[in-house]
Structures are given as C-alpha cells and as structure tokens.
Image (cartoon, grey):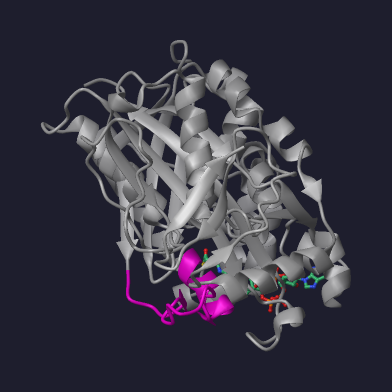
Amino acid sequence: RKDVGILAVDIYVPPACVQQDSLETYDGASKGKYTIGLGQDCMSFCSEVEDVISMSLTVVTSLLGKYKIDPRQIGRLEVGSETVIDKSKIVQECGNTDVEGVDSTNACYGGTAALFNCVNWVESNSWDGRYGLVVCTDSAVLITSPAFHFFFPTSPSYWGAASIAMLIGPNAPIVFESKYRGTHMSHVYDFYKPDLASEYPFVVDGKLSQTCYLMALDLCYSRFCSKFEKYEGRQFSLSDADYVVFHSPYNKLVQKSFARLYFNDFTRNCSWIEKEAREKLEPFSSLSADESYQSRDLEKASQLVAKHLYDQKIQPSTLLPKQVGNMYTASIYAALISVLHNKHSSLAGQRIVMFSYGSGLTSTMFSLKVNDGQHPFSLSNIAAILDVSHKLESRHVVAPEKFVETLKLMEHRYGAKDFVTSGDADLLPPGTFYLTHVDSLYRRFYVRK
Ligand code: ACO
C-alpha cells in the first residue's frame, strides 16, 4: 500500500465563544495574563444543547457528505476522546454495522492512538480495502477561574471544544512516515481525573504538567532523531522539518516547546544553528537537564534566538488553538488543520513533524510528508471544504457572564438523567446535531437542525 495517511479532514467548532481579554476583566486577572501570558485569543464552548457526541455526529456527517463517502465504505472507526459520557460506543444508524474499532481514552493522546490504529490497520494484512475514520472529540472543562474558586484555587479559565474527523487510506496527500516515531511513556500524576462523578479533572499540577510536557518532548525528539538517523544515515535537525505541530493546550507552551527543540539542536551540535545563536546559548551548555527545565534565562534566550524560525515553522499552526482554546484530543489536529488552511498552496513536498502529548503521561513525535493529492483529496479541496476562516468568523461572541451561566447548568446536568434541554438551536449552523433530552434510563436523544 502506497502513501497511507490522511485523505480528508473536517472540523466542527461550537458557535458560542468568549474573548480571552473579556475573561481577564471578568476574572479580575491582570491585563494580558490570558492573551499574552498564556497566548490565547478566544475560546469556544458547548452550549447546553451540545456535547462531544453531537459534535462528532455533526463533523462525521459533514465529512462524509462533502466528500460523497457512503458510510458502508468505512471499515474502521476509531474515536479518541477524554470526555467520558457513557463509556459505550455510539454508532448512528447508517446502514453499516461491519465496522471495527473501539474508543481510545488516554488524556489528550487518545486521538493520536486512534489515528495510529487506523493507519496501522490500512498498512496491515487485516485491511479490507475500505477507509478508516478517526474522530477526535472533546469539550475541555478545566475550571481554574476565580469565579469557580469553590472547585479550584486561583488560575485562569481554560476551556475549548471541537470535533475533528479524519479519513484514512492509501494514496493520501498527507502521508505517514511511519518509520520515524519517537515515543515516551511515564507514570506521573500531573493532570488526571480520579473522580468520575465530576466533569472536572480536579487534580492538576499545572507547573509539573509543563515540565513533564517539555521532558517528554526532549525524549521523543531524541528517539525520533535516532530513528531518522538509523534509516537515513544522516543527522536530523529542525531544518528537515518545514513545520512542527504541537499538542496545544495554550499557545505559550507551544512557544516554549519550539525554543526547547531549538536548544536541543544546539546541544546536539547541529550545523544549521547560526554562530550568533550558538554564542547566545553557549552559557547554558553546562546546565544539567533538571537545571535547564528551571532556567528562566535559558527559556528567554532560546525563545529569542528561535523567534524568526517560530514565525516560519510554528506560527501557521497556531490559529485554531489560539482561537478555540484547549480541545484536548483535537488540539494537535486543529493545529495541523491550521497549517493546511494557511499553507495548502505551498505544502507539497514538505515535512510536518507532530508532537502529541497526553498527561499521565503518553507522548509521541511522528512525521508527515505532504503531496498535492488527487481530487477530491487534494490539498486545495481539503482547505476549501475546511473553510476555517468562515467557521471562525461566523461564531457568536458572548459575555463571560453567559459562559459562566452555561457552566453552572452543565455542572448541574453532568451525569444527570430525565431532563429536557431548551432545544435552542438558533446559533447552530444548519446540519448541526444537538441534544434534545435524556430519558430516565440516561439514554440521550439528538436531532439534526
Ligand atoms: N501580562 C503578560 N504576561 C503575564 C501576565 C500579564 N498580565 N500575567 C502573567 N503573565 C505570564 C507569566 O509571566 C507566565 O509566563 P511564563 O510561562 O513565560 O512564565 C504566564 O503568564 C502564566 O502565568 P502564571 O502566573 O504562571 O499562571 P498560572 O499560575 O495561572 O499557571 C498554568 C499557568 C500552569 C499554565 C495553568 O494555567 C495551568 O495549570 N494550566 C493547565 C495545565 C496545562 O495545560 N498543562 C499543559 C500540559 S497538560 C495538557 O495538555 C492538558
């Protein structure tokens, strides 16, 4: 099988959103804390008629419809999500019951596990010639706003929601370079949900999770480079990657991550690091690994010397994560979609390196090679169907008060039965699925607008 990878992709973002600067004011945070400090612009959230299931139904129906794929052409369906609803698979009636695959749940990594399963299936002897379909769907509900101090101590609000569907098969425009994968798994309590009775993952050590993320990044990069070097017989450096796409809980972490990779290339003596940058980083070369994670000076110096490359290799991936917020499993693929949206006309022949991270922790760096693709699976058609600008611009900005009101209702409804939603679908675009009621046996009912 040749060129196995992503043939097509679609994203659904709920239409309600809050501007981060208005949240700064509402939360009484210092001006710039969320917008500059965390690097976020806006965040989308599910209203009381939407959830991870309705968003998945919407995005899958949209993808299949726009690419004219009959559901019977799908042989494997994998869902990655960390938003547990009823722990069983929801397959909408579509005339196809011959579908393999179950859900993958492992913090923000579930979508990547689902994607690998589909790619591996198409590459394997079990493949029956049909498409794989990956869905990443999450509504991230991490309340750290002062408005919710009764749940959590101080810290900014932090939210996002989206569903992404990816069609997997051979002769794809976005091809897996499956040989180059670097993985790191480790047992850490950085961010986890021990209390399944609550929607909130109420044990999170934010600072530890940042350090865990950066340590995992270092290890994955080193393993990724070793694999590349083994197969290619030459050193890998960031100059071999046209874009690097990160799991993006908030943009500041992405800025730190790219600077960290650049520092890795410096310590690995990669020839492409310019003399001036080398001189600026030299004072940090004697730091131990532990010291290097704590050094603010190193963080600042490496961000500064890598800035022009950040603009080139990273900035195009930041649009959706900055605009929509943390989408958990969907975050990294929303970043990939941002690259497709911004750069589709010049991507052919280029390499995109991906870093996926799930707390707990599970992480992988892997590589994609892009070609123009063939209609309907061409880059230009994918970008046109994604229609990212329209999706973002047609959202409705609501005040923080309205957002907090929704949160309170959702907390009340979490795990509840026997309720009818308002059924208010005014904001939803035509074709969107939404929740109408949950019966006395917790069964959920959706309709399509
Ligand atoms: N203007 C500009 N910058 C500001 C301002 C301001 N007014 N106020 C603060 N900042 C900067 C800080 O200097 C800091 O920058 P730095 O990271 O370069 O040091 C940044 O904003 C954050 O400020 P803190 O005071 O550190 O904020 P807080 O204590 O709220 O912690 C954290 C931030 C740890 C990211 C928190 O939001 C959190 O716990 N998030 C969830 C954990 C997470 O996402 N981890 C990532 C991996 S796990 C996963 O993917 C789910």
Q: Quadrant of the C terminus?
A: top right
Q: Quadrant of residue 354?
A: top left
Please tell me in which quadrant of the rendered image residue 98 appears. Answer: top left
Image coords of residue 86 (percent x, y): 38, 64
Between 360 and 59, which is closer to the camera in this rendering?
59
Rendering quadrant holding ligand 1: bottom right
Q: Nearer the viewer, residue 56 or 175?
A: 56
* Residue under the point 33% across and 18% down: 171
- What range is drawn magenta here? 186-214
Q: Is 342 one of the magenta-colored residues?
A: no
Question: Where residue 189 sits in the image (x, y, percent)?
Answer: 41, 80
Q: Is residue 272 left or right of residue 150?
A: left
Say which residue appears at 82% left-offset and 75% top-offset.
27
Q: As displayed, is residue 154 above or below residue 353?
A: below
Q: Is residue 397 left or right of residue 152?
A: right
Is residue 327 in view from this perspective?
A: yes
Query: Measured along the vertical axis of the image, is residue 55 above or below residue 382?
Result: below
Q: Is residue 72 left or right of residue 306?
A: left
